[in-house]
Image (cartoon, coloured by chain):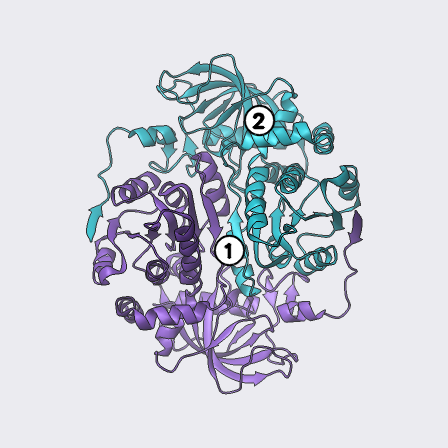
Chain colours: A purple, B cyan
Amino acid sequence: MTSIPSPFPLAAASPLEAALGLHRVLEPRGVLPQAAWRLDPSPSIAVDEVLVRVDRLNLDAASYRQLREAHGGDADKIRAAVLDIVATRGKMQNPVTGSGGMLTGTVAEVGPESPLGLRPGQRIATLVSLTLTPLVIADSLARWDGRSEQVPCDGHAVLFARSIAAVLPDDLSPELALAVMDVCGAPALTQRIVRESAAAGPAAGPVVAILGAAGKSGSLSAAAARAAGAAKIIGVVPHEAEAQLLRGAGALVDAIVIADARDPVGVAAAVERAGGPADVTVVCVDAPGCEGGAILSTAQGGTVIFFSMATSFSAAALGAEGMAADVRMLVGNGYVPGHADLALELIRTNPAVRALFERRIAE
Amino acid sequence: MTSIPSPFPLAAASPLEAALGLHRVLEPRGVLPQAAWRLDPSPSIAVDEVLVRVDRLNLDAASYRQLREAHGGDADKIRAAVLDIVATRGKMQNPVTGSGGMLTGTVAEVGPESPLGLRPGQRIATLVSLTLTPLVIADSLARWDGRSEQVPCDGHAVLFARSIAAVLPDDLSPELALAVMDVCGAPALTQRIVRESAAAGPAAGPVVAILGAAGKSGSLSAAAARAAGAAKIIGVVPHEAEAQLLRGAGALVDAIVIADARDPVGVAAAVERAGGPADVTVVCVDAPGCEGGAILSTAQGGTVIFFSMATSFSAAALGAEGMAADVRMLVGNGYVPGHADLALELIRTNPAVRALFERRIAE
């Protein structure tokens, strides 16, 4: 047995620390950029960084919803709140929800040791969260009406060596590509889990329930579940208008259930009558309180994937225990290798999902 | 494709609602007991309920720590805070941490339709959280000195049909059995995941890192990982005193690392030098901010199991994305069938872990 003490703090950042952006953390020192209260968004880049001229932010749905509700939908107040967060923190991380979003822009400068393979002039989207991306807004958000999570803006941002960015495709509008890439972790992880479940379970394939199936991550996850071998997909939506959207998406799901995902017993009973309980339940509802419903809609031995940033860790852990539910619960990791390509391919090959996205963007 | 509307609210509780205890929820109506602000702890039981005369509460570590820190260690204030929570909410759920704990007592009355198989007079421990257990404290906690999470008390509690309770074993002291059963979900899930990893991975077996390895859930999880075929177990502890405890536990772990689990880069570097990164990382540290260190200590394709109630869902999800880490992240479910029996068996057959527990209890 060996005892290995932790290293002494380094005067200069190690390569790993630099790659993760620790040199940009102002407060508190030593934590990762995502956990930091305040980052240094200076446009002077290190050798392994990339400077991006930002043209659009896409706020996380839970963050935008919180801001809109906190300010009663008042556009000036919502704009002021976002400006204040970015000016104070050097990044767009909503202090209430803890979540951020993503951005698009043009590559302005590439450090000689950046491993991201980007060139100046390329239009890109970041696939790492705004919660850890140094950001300055230079135009007071004058072009944003505050009525949508898509925020046109002028400013700059910094990417680290371990950041992830994707060049925007030529064949899709930037709005569509951005909306797709924003949620691309969900279909990628759903595909992986449904495939595993299909390989391990009954020959017919798993039953998949998707809470929030008419939304962006929900509809893409449904398409991914289908491609991965789901036997039956149950789409859960909160009201008739969302059900209509989903009906318009053809065979994306096999059954549509209208239920309040925050009502555990109600949603579980409705999913059961539609062919459940599910072997895999995917939570794409950006509202708090959906943990119990997801757990109760899932068969013993099944899996719940939580993609909503409104998920409460303790509500999930204690809820499953409290209901004697032997379910595997996954924190939806936004990074799965190849996730952007998979999501863009699902949009290209699935006209119904594409139409649904285009309607959402036009809203 | 079929559309199935949600059911109309029922005037009387359905059997599922009754089994889950929804009839005990006073505020807000319709949510599960764990999500409720306030429960009805009346001692008049329904046909499928069990009434328990409570003799001891075992507060969740994160909850007790928060109470102790919020009140500067003042015993009278800590006692008053617990009494106030239970009187206000009808259950012991810390409003800050959201967590509870468990209890022991004697079965006082069993409803004729209870499926739990209990008889009046049996001494039991509840294996469902206090966060959903109707509770009344009758003795003002006069016998509790406020200096430990073990709270002697007199009062009553109610178990539902879907609650889980275990009869206390004859061959172990109640304090030891309670402490073991309080954390029995951790070794059970660790065993399952390490077994899966051993079956799928290299012949030598997986490398397992345990953050908080000298604690109760950590040491039991280490014993479970060993039994499940771990090739190497790396125990991470915060300081030399904990390292001493772990060294005293013999071959429980293969390497001891002293590192601050809240320092992601520091802990990852130390784990790597001890033989990491880990295929399976188990987080048993009851302090916030350990998500990044756990993720960064885990190999690409590996698994992190979060057992700490101080885990932040968004910090885990966004942290993994922000570090481009393709790791599977599990919410530690406190319920795995057979979990209490497994944990008690690990204690019986593992004198080193038993000694470690007995030292912790005596502290």
Farthest residue in the front direction? B203
Q: In this view, does B299 lie above or below A343?
A: above
Residue at 66 percent of width and 51 percent of height:
B204
Q: Distance between the residues labelled 1 and 2?
A: 31 Å
Determine whether A341 is above or below A60 in the image. Answer: below
Location of the C terminus of chain B (image quadrant): top right
* Residue located 65% across and 60% down the image: A31
Residue at 77%, 65% in the rendered image: A10
Q: Mark 2 lies on which chain?
A: B
Q: Do the numbered discs 1 and 2 sit on residues whose CB atoms are within 8 Å?
A: no
Q: How crowded is mark 2: few (under 14 residues within 10 Å), some or many (20 or more)?
A: many
Q: Earlier in the sequence, mark 1 or mark 2?
A: 2
Q: Report which quarter residue A104 is drawn in.
A: bottom left
Q: In this view, does A133 lie to the left or right of B235?
A: left
User: In the rendered view, does A1 fall on the left or right side of B283?
Assistant: right
In the rendered image, residues at marks 1 and 2 fall on the same chain:
yes
Q: What residue type is labelled 2?
A: Leu
Q: Residue at left 41%, top 68%?
A: A342
State the residue lying farthest toward the top: B121
Which chain is disc 1 placed on? B
Residue B363 visible in the shown view:
no
Residue wearing tag 2: B57
Residue extending furthest bottom?
A121
- The residue that label 1 is drawn on is B314
Q: Where is residue A54 in the image (x, y as percent from the top left)?
A: 48, 79
Q: Is residue B352 left or right of residue A312?
A: right
Where disc 1 sits, the SS reads helix
The percent position of residue A23, horizontal first and vertical second, equals: 67, 70
Q: Where is residue B217 in the image (x, y as percent from the top left)?
A: 63, 38
Q: Where is residue B358 in the image (x, y as percent from the top left)?
A: 71, 28
Residue B331 has which mark? none
The residue nearer to you, when weighing B77 against A176, is A176
